[in-house]
Image (cartoon, rainbow, N blue to C red):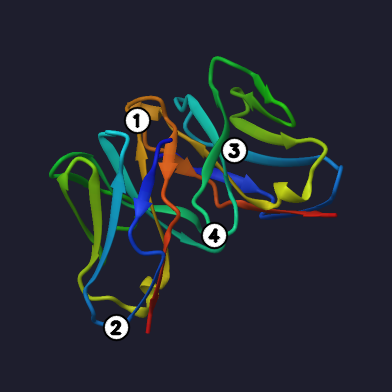
Amino acid sequence: DVKVTQSSRYLVKRMGEKVFLECVQDMDHENMFWYRQDPGLGLRLIYFSYDVKMKEKGDIPKGYSVSREKKERFSLILESASTNQTSMYLCASIAGVTGELFFGEGSRLTVL
Amino acid sequence: GENVEQHPSTLSVQEGDSAVIKCTYSDSASNYFPWYKQELGKGPQLIIDIRSNVGEKKDQRIAVTLNKTAKHFSLHITETQPEDSAVYFCAASGGGGSYIPTFGRGTSLIVHP
């Protein structure tokens, strides 16, 4: 079974803290994504990566950075967490040109 | 870039009824249209998809139709069951050679027993 694993399901952080969200996929996919999900706003793309050490900004990159040092791992970093970054974060990977996205179960982040 | 509109945002039906969710897209070059189902506490999961060379696709109680001329596609669920209750997202991709999907805002489907 294909699998995308997000290391933390629930996190509570304080404003100004640095936050790391980790994602690992076991499907040898080249492309990985980080989405943010908020009620009524759907899934918004933060960053994606099409290869190791390669990254591209999505629609809402401000306040976030990413790291892809190994093919299977894609990390989302909040350098200085703010309350407006309280949200559900979803990691996903895609197999080449097939189009199907495989999602992790999400990381719910609360910033106090 | 691509823009995907999804309606309704909430849909409430009685068990056994049909449910229809509609999406429109803006980029006529888009050629891949997946639908994802997100159950409570889980990540979205692909339930059905359609490519632009096909007008309709069925899988048991779910079907998707695509009208390329009008640039809209729809998800149809027949004989709804309580376990169909979830958030459904449509998406479109392939325009300009991009594999990155643009999502609609989601529809919360509630099936009442």
* Mark in the foreground, 4 or 1: 4
Q: Amino acid at mark 4?
A: Gly
Cα distance, mark 3 to mark 2?
39 Å
Q: Amino acid at mark 1?
A: Ala
Question: In the rendering, at what x and y percent does residue B12 appear?
Answer: 79, 55
* Mark in the foreground, 3 or 2: 2
Residue A18 lies in quadrant? bottom left
Q: Amino acid at mark 2?
A: Met
- Badge 4: residue crowd in 10 Å (few <14, some 14–19, many ≥20): few
Q: Which residue in the protein does label 1 denote? A: A95
Residue B113 lies in quadrant? bottom right
The numbered disc on residue B24 is 3
- The answer to the question of whether label 1 and label 2 lie on touching residues, with beta carbons closer than 8 A, is no
Give the residue drawn at x 59%, y 51%.
B106
Judged from the image, the secondary structure of the residue bearing numbered disc 4 is: loop
* Mark in the foreground, 4 or 3: 4
- Badge 2: residue crowd in 10 Å (few <14, some 14–19, many ≥20): some
Q: Chain of mark 2?
A: A
Question: Outermost residue, front direction?
Answer: A1
Judged from the image, the secondary structure of the residue bearing numbered disc 3 is: strand
Q: Which residue in the protein does label 4 denote? A: B41
